[in-house]
Image (cartoon, rainbow, N blue to C red):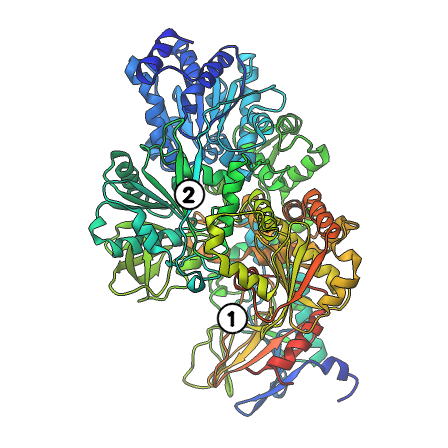
């Protein structure tokens, strides 16, 4: 590496860690790889300095040398400073620029014809740049690609999108330079490092993996309710534990309060400020819907130490660098082991120093989750993060990107996309069908009269329609969410965005909390909600979609082991003492879940006839299990079941008496792993899981637009729901690839056969402990409350109506 | 009743302003005295509109929808078919093949076809010349009814309208079904959307309100 650069590092940062030195050496010898170290340990310079050093050597030449991809827009500002720092200090003649959704249009225009030496961007903006007709000229010379916080991307379709873009850059750069560009992925907190490295660097690039030994001890404690009997059995917004949180916020100390959802953040921010009005001006709110300038203000306040308290969601989980904080508080479920470790890592931000987090429950069962998380962290467990397997919706989007970005020939593109982990086993016929869909809309051409996205120019596939280009560029990406509505004061000052599904429930004149302020809705016009400041108490709390992140599978399993240990009397923790009455209620009403047995509960309420089963395998597997159980139960008696699933278990609700106990006692096949594949398919077709999954698939593949460019008239003409589209496809093009994709995603995520099979085997090896309960138990209560909107029925529509008719209609 | 008995099951007879109306599960209303079939919100060319705007939606629904209208007219031996607005979805969706399909259908249909303009139809200035339909500005007065698209109270006559795509929810013990419905209030009656490809607006029960849910084969009076 260039001596100046090394000297700069020693002077400004200090003696390099071993992992940094090893990464520098590997990079100099042209290798690619993955650096796996805790947050804040200095990953960025490990990968960036050798790249910078090479950039110095090509300083005279034009064109991109270093591409730095970061998953979050919010991170790019700080990263840009970090990337510019050695350049400025050394007086190098190199430009660093950012390209995100926030980039000014003048800069965008310039970047269209020439890129800086160092470009910092996000996966979505990278895809967008690849749609320019001269994309190859822009990116052909790239020497080093760095992907930051790869663990945040790898297990989502955003990761798949990144993989596809990188495969394209690898092919271009190899042809232009004879050597592939180096790729370095930076990651914290995942267990499948080799797979992650291959996904980032290309499966054929023989990537290296460097880990650091800088792991810091993590101390996890829980705020314990004084009166557990008065503590709620379920709820995520409750402020019951406000007092212990206020106690933790001490004068002169900096405190970061992490919440899981934006509504929770709004609520806690407001409550803390109401209780401690003297904090005004020194307390900030940070979440993804708060306006960017407001967020930046909070980030600055964190860095400068002007803020004593910041209430945040995962919008602050990544990258935003700030000085070590004195305290980190986690409100509600910790969701995942790695996530908790990462959040705790925000305290005592120096390598080697212990980090601490106080977990605050919003309902009783979370106490057990905290205890389980601590056990898991202590035994060094982490979640793997696996890349999705060949999602065709992302592939179709990428095909349109490539067709716009200079065009492609199918043979070359096939070769290119199969040089990824995500599409490594894509067959040519799958590829061709996806291409056909991108070209014409579907297999049955006559059904897709007047539709054409990708056109042909000999062998090449291109896009000629200007409208297709505009449409594609506005909808690029794989993040699917509700259409966003801007929130502005009547004087037009912007406050941020909320999801349409929330604001449509607020009536004019009603009050709600947003951006930490109490507001009254004045009117909604042109995708903007106009508000004014209000007094009094809120009538509504905004709920945003992404609020239901499931807890990780590893954590669910840790919870199962913890309950097993509790039952066996082999586990002690302060949380258990505090929650003793809950355990007692569970034991008295039903029983405690055991390590080797599976607890089932039968309950009758006004709502109907319930069966609860608690395997503790995580929400995704439980959703699959619920559908499977419903199907197998319905073979005994025709029925329509309402299904519910959460981290702990599943609930089946029948509107009429159902012989639960007899089925559980006598039907060996209920939890059998035999015929799993067939039954899974059947329950997908009968149930509603595929319909829900289709929502995301349809958006990524360009079937549903949000924020559609063009006139409002067009928008009203295209108003529909993905559910309706699903029905249209199912009726008129049942073999459509995107329907198949939705079904496949359900199979993979909810019925992931190896995991569901393992779960079934585990359940059938042990005993079923079936209890009749007279009222909902602490374990069952959350399932009753948060019922997912899913049903499975083998009754005919006519029978269902007949049954309801008795209650609702007279002939 | 004669041989059509089986076909008649599932229909509901109701009286409005002294006139007998028969509600059919085919999502139309039949007015025997005037030999008139009423339907609302057909949305011809909706799928093609989506395709024109870059959403690859398969065609297929149009033929089925028009055939359903033909069947109703034939079975009931209707003389007039009145569309209570939104016969078409958008001008851009009227592709050659959509226009031709409607031309053939309208010329073959034994009944006279009257379209009372709805908000979607207004984007088109009159029907394509080959269509054998009368294109009328609302309201169309046929005593004692005011036939129109917009379900707004009219000064002279009970309103029969469309536009809302009304639906009703049936629930029991965790089971829920959303069904299209007819809705009759004291001054206004709203027909269900004839097209199945549409999102509906859920109707709440009310005092002076009668709701009739539509299942595959029958119309049910819903009492709450």
Q: Quadrant of residue B97?
A: bottom right
The answer for how far apart the CA atoms under marks 2 and 1 are is 36 Å
Image location of residue A336, percent across then percent down: 51, 43
Mark 2 sits on what residue? A314
- For disc 1, the chain is B
- For disc 2, the chain is A
Query: Residue placed farthest to the front in the image?
Result: A569
Q: Residues within 10 Å of mark 2 (few under 14, many from 20)?
A: some
Please indicate whether residue A500 sits to the left or right of residue A681 in the image: left
Mark 1 sits on what residue? B202
Q: How crowded is mark 1: few (under 14 residues within 10 Å), some or many (20 or more)?
A: some
Image location of residue A252, percent across then percent down: 23, 40
Label annotation for residue A501: none
For the residues beneath circles 2 and 1, the answer to whether they share a chain is no
Closer to viewer: mark 2 or mark 1: 2
Please indicate whether residue A281 sits to the left or right of residue A713 in the image: left
Q: In which quarter of the image is the N terminus of chain A?
A: top left
Q: In which quarter of the image is residue A783?
A: bottom right
Q: In which quarter of the image is the C terminus of chain A?
A: bottom right
Vertical placement of residue A400 versus A740, above or below: above
Q: Nearer the viewer, residue A685 or A730?
A: A685
Image location of residue A297, percent across then percent down: 27, 40
Residue A454 appears in view: no
The secondary structure type at the circle numbered 2 is helix
The secondary structure type at the circle numbered 1 is strand
Residue A555 appears in view: yes
Q: What residue sits 43% from the left and 30% below the top?
A: A39
Please indicate whether residue A22 sits to the left or right of residue B103 in the image: left
């Amino acid at each position: 590496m260039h001596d100046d650069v090394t000297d700069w590092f020693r002077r400004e940062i200090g003696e390099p860690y071993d992992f940094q030195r090893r990464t520098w050496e590997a990079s100099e010898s042209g290798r690619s790889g993955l650096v796996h170290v805790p947050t804040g340990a200095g990953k960025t310079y490990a990968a960036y300095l050798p790249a910078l050093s090479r950039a110095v050597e090509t300083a005279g030449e034009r064109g991109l040398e270093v591409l730095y991809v970061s998953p979050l827009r919010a991170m790019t500002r700080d990263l840009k400073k970090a990337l510019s720092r050695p350049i400025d200090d050394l007086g190098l003649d190199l430009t660093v620029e950012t390209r995100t959704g926030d980039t000014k249009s003048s800069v965008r225009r310039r970047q269209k014809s020439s890129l800086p030496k160092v470009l910092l961007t996000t996966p979505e903006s990278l895809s967008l740049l690849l749609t320019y007709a001269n994309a190859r000229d822009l990116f052909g010379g790239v020497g080093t690609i760095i992907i930051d916080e790869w663990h945040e991307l790898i297990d989502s379709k955003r990761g798949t999108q990144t993989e596809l873009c990188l495969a394209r850059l690898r092919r271009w750069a190899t042809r232009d330079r004879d050597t592939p560009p180096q790729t370095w992925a930076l990651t914290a907190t995942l267990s499948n490092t080799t797979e992650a490295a291959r996904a980032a660097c290309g499966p054929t690039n023989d990537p290296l993996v460097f880990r650091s030994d800088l792991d810091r001890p993590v101390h996890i404690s829980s705020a314990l309710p004084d009166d557990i009997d008065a503590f709620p059995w379920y709820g995520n917004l409750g402020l019951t534990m406000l007092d212990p949180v206020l106690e933790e916020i001490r004068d002169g100390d900096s405190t970061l309060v992490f919440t899981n959802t934006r509504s929770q953040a709004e609520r806690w921010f407001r409550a803390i400020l109401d209780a401690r009005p003297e904090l005004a001006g020194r307390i900030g709110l940070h979440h993804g819907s708060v306006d960017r300038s407001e967020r930046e203000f909070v980030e600055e306040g964190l860095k400068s130490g002007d803020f004593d308290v910041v209430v945040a969601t995962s919008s602050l989980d990544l990258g935003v660098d700030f000085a070590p904080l004195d305290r980190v508080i986690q409100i509600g479920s910790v969701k995942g082991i790695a996530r908790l470790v990462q959040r705790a890592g925000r305290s005592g931000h120096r390598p080697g120093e212990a980090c601490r987090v106080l977990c605050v429950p919003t309902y009783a069962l979370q106490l057990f989750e905290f205890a389980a998380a601590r056990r898991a962290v202590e035994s060094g467990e982490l979640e793997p993060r696996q890349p999705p397997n060949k999602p065709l919706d992302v592939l179709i989007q990428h095909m349109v990107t490539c067709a716009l970005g200079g065009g492609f020939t199918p043979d070359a593109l096939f070769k290119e996309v199969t040089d990824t982990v995500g599409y490594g086993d894509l067959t040519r016929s799958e590829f061709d069908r996806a291409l056909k869909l991108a070209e014409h809309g579907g297999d049955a051409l006559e059904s897709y009269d007047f539709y054409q996205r990708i056109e042909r120019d000999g062998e090449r596939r291109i896009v000629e329609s200007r409208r297709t280009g505009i449409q594609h560029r506005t909808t690029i990406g794989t993040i699917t969410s509700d259409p966003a509505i801007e929130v502005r004061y009547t004087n037009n000052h912007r406050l941020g965005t909320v999801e349409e599904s929330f604001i449509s429930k607020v009536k004019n004149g009603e009050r709600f909390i947003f951006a930490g302020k109490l507001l009254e809705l004045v009117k909604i016009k042109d995708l903007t909600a106009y508000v004014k400041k209000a007094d009094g108490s809120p009538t509504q709390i905004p709920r945003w979609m992404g609020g239901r992140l499931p807890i990780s599978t590893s954590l669910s399993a840790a919870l199962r082991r913890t309950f097993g240990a509790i039952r066996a009397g082999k586990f002690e923790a302060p949380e258990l003492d505090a929650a003793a009455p809950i355990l007692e209620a569970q034991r008295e009403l039903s029983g405690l879940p055991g390590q080797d047995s599976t607890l089932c509960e039968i309950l009758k309420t006004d709502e109907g006839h319930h069966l609860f089963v608690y395997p503790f395998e995580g929400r995704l597997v439980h959703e699959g299990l619920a559908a499977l159980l419903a199907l197998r139960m319905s073979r005994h008696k025709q029925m329509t079941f309402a299904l519910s699933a959460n981290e702990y278990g599943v609930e089946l609700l029948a509107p009429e008496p159902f012989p639960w106990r007899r089925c559980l006692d006598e039907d060996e096949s209920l939890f059998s792993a035999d015929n799993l594949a067939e039954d899974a398919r059947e329950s997908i077709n009968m149930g509603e899981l595929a319909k829900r999954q289709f929502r995301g698939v349809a958006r990524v593949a360009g079937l549903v637009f949000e924020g559609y460019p063009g006139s409002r008239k067009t928008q009203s003409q295209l108003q529909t729901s993905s559910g309706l589209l699903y029905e249209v496809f199912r009726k008129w093009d049942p073999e459509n690839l995107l329907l198949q994709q939705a079904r496949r995603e359900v199979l993979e995520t909810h019925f992931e056969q190896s995991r569901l099979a393992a779960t079934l085997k585990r359940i059938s090896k042990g005993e079923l402990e079936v209890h009749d309960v007279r009222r909902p138990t602490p374990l069952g209560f959350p399932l009753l409350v948060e019922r997912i909107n899913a049903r499975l029925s083998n009754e005919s529509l006519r029978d269902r109506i007949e049954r309801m008719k008795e209650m609702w209609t007279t002939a | 009743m004669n041989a059509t008995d089986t076909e008649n099951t599932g229909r509901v007879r109701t009286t409005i302003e002294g006139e007998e109306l028969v509600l059919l599960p085919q999502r139309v209303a039949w007015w025997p005295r005037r030999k008139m079939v009423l339907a609302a919100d057909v949305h011809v060319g909706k799928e093609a509109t989506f395709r024109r705007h870059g959403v690859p939606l398969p065609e297929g629904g149009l033929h089925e929808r028009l055939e359903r209208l033909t069947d109703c007219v034939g079975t009931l031996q209707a003389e007039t078919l009145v569309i209570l607005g939104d016969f078409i979805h958008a001008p851009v969706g009227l592709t050659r093949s959509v226009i031709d399909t409607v031309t053939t259908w309208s010329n073959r249909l034994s009944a006279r076809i009257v379209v009372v303009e709805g908000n979607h139809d207004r984007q088109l200035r009159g029907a394509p010349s080959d269509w054998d339909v009368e294109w009328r500005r609302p309201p169309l007065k046929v005593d004692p009814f005011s036939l129109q698209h917009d379900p707004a109270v009219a000064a002279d006559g009970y309103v029969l309208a469309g536009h809302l795509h009304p639906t009703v929810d049936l629930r029991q013990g965790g089971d829920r079904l959303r069904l299209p419905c007819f809705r009759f209030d004291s001054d206004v009656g709203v027909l269900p959307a004839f097209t199945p490809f549409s999102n509906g607006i859920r109707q709440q029960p009310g005092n002076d309100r009668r709701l009739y849910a539509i299942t595959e084969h029958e119309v049910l009076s819903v009492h709450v």
